[in-house]
Image: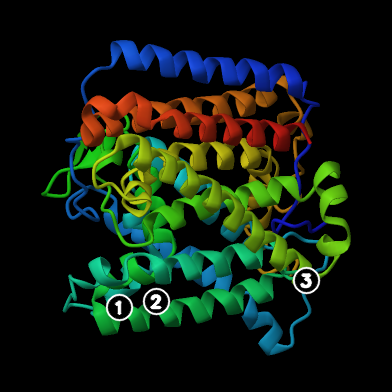
């Protein structure tokens, strides 16, 4: 059954919401108080810089080849239709699992642990290198355009995932991947390979942001180096539109989780039954969370004093939302990965739904026990709370660096925002 986010849903245990939200709020408040007393100087503002894709790590070409292979498998879903070959309606094809599970979830989640390996597996970078395009970089473009074009691409991708009724159609995914490939290659031709990916490819800044959490970084030579957890978040480039990009990462997952809850359906009524209504609700979710964050930044700017503006604060503190975005995504999609990820083993033997069994795995079923255990539910709750705890730590450290003596006072509104976002995450999980 194809549901809102492309492949299927997840089933969670009921959450005792009142108990959980009270306990989570207490943990956040206590953490804030302890930080105000014990953490009196900034410690995370001089982290190591990111130096782009690997040039010397073994396996670089293999990762790039795997990325291109995955892209071709997705685009190849169109070929049987063009040739008039009938596909099996019951066999799971490889495209939805590759797009909605591996590409959209597994790679970014892995980046939070192993570093930005998307830079190596990125199929569009590999194709650009193969075709020799984008050698002349317009290095000033990210400063001018920022990630606004990438944000538009991200919203388009999420709309296809969460709103479009064809999100699980392998042919639609194949056509979308083909169009996106042409667009990204054209961008690289016009503005340069790395510039084009940073500005126009939604998944380059997306993975770049999440990988800044990882303790694994890159040396200037391209080799791997241990840098420590969270060390690169504070030095993420402050591209124009950065804070809206990160807020969108949070809001889209929030919409996906809330849209299936009874309380959300009661509030929205019939809006969620039409394509235009779903589009409106997705846009409204992004705007509401963006407004909440911006109002917190307005309050922080006023409490900090001086010449600070809300717009500047929003950019400076955007990185503090990245762990929250990751926590929301992991918590919401954990069971989806465990459930649908198992189907990849079956689908890889019959990638186009033609009845093949290339590797003898086409008949393998799904182990449902992995998606229904109580420990997974506790992990989901833990991810949500931990993400906001890390956000409070990052915000406190940045406020010490930027606001000095007014650091603690400036963060009152941010603390309220963190508690509200934690409550929202737990509410969605309980629904």
Mark 3 and mark 1: Cα distance apart in space: 33 Å
Label 3 sits on a secondary structure element that is: helix
Q: Quadrant of residue 93?
A: bottom right
Residue under the image location 39 percent in, 12 percent down: 34
Circle 2 or circle 3, nearest the eye: 3
Label 3 Cα crowd, 10 Å radius (few <14 / some 14-19 / many 20+): few
* Foreground residue among 119 and 285: 285
* Foreground residue among 135 and 309: 309
Residue 158 in the image, given as x and y percentages of width and height: 60, 62
Residue 131 in the image, given as x and y percentages of width and height: 28, 80
Proximity of marks 3 and 1: CB atoms separated by less than 8 Å: no
Circle 3 or circle 1, nearest the eye: 3
Residue at the bottom extreme of this rendering: 83
Residue 323 in the image, given as x and y percentages of width and height: 45, 37
Q: Which residue is mark 3?
A: 275
Label 1 sits on a secondary structure element that is: helix
Residue under the image location 60 percent in, 75 percent down: 174
Residue under the image location 67 percent in, 88 percent down: 82
Looking at the image, residue 33 sits to the left or right of residue 286; the answer is left
Q: Which residue is mark 2?
A: 184
Q: Which mark is residue 188?
A: 1
Q: Tell me which label, 3 or 1, sits earlier in the chain.
A: 1
Residue 431 in the image, given as x and y percentages of width and height: 79, 36
319 w.r.t. 102: above or below: above
Proximity of marks 2 and 3: CB atoms separated by less than 8 Å: no
């Amino acid at each position: 059954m194809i549901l809102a986010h492309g492949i299927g849903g997840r089933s969670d245990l009921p959450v005792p919401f009142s108990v959980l939200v009270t306990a989570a709020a207490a943990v956040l408040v206590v953490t804030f108080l302890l930080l105000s007393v014990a953490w009196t100087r900034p410690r995370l503002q001089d982290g190591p810089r990111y130096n782009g894709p690997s040039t010397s790590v073994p396996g670089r070409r293999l990762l790039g080849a795997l990325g291109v292979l995955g892209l071709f498998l997705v685009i190849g879903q169109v070929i049987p239709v063009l040739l008039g070959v009938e596909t099996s309606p019951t066999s799971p094809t490889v495209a939805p699992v590759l797009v909605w599970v591996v590409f959209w979830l597994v790679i970014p989640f892995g980046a939070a642990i192993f570093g930005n390996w998307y830079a190596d597996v990125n199929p569009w970078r590999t194709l650009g290198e193969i075709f020799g395009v984008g050698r002349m970089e317009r290095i000033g473009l990210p400063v001018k355009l920022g990630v606004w074009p990438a944000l538009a691409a991200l919203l388009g991708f999420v709309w296809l995932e969460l709103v479009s009724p064809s999100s699980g159609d392998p042919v639609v995914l194949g056509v979308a991947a083909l169009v996106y490939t042409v667009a990204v290659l054209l961008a690289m031709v016009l503005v340069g390979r790395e510039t084009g990916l940073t500005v126009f490819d939604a998944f380059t800044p997306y993975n770049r942001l999440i990988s800044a959490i990882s303790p694994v970084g890159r040396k200037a030579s391209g080799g791997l180096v241990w840098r420590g957890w969270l060390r690169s978040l504070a030095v993420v480039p402050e591209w124009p539109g950065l804070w809206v990009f990160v807020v969108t990462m949070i809001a889209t997952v929030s919409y996906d989780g809330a849209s299936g809850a009874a309380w959300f359906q009661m509030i929205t009524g019939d809006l969620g039954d039409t394509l235009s209504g779903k589009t409106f609700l997705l846009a409204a979710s992004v705007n509401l969370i963006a407004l909440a964050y911006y109002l917190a930044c307005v309050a922080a700017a006023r409490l900090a004093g001086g010449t600070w503006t809300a717009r500047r604060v929003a950019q400076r503190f955007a990185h503090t939302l990245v762990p929250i975005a990751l926590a929301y995504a992991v918590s919401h999609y954990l069971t989806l990965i465990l459930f649908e990820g198992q189907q990849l083993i079956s689908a890889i033997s019959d990638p186009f739904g033609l009845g093949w069994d290339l590797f003898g795995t086409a008949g393998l079923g799904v182990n449902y026990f992995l998606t229904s255990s109580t420990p997974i539910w506790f992990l989901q709750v833990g991810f949500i709370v931990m993400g906001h705890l890390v956000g409070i730590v990052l915000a406190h450290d940045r406020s010490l660096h930027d606001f000095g003596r007014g650091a603690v006072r400036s963060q009152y509104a941010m603390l309220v925002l963190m508690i509200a976002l934690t409550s929202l995450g737990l509410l969605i999980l309980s629904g």
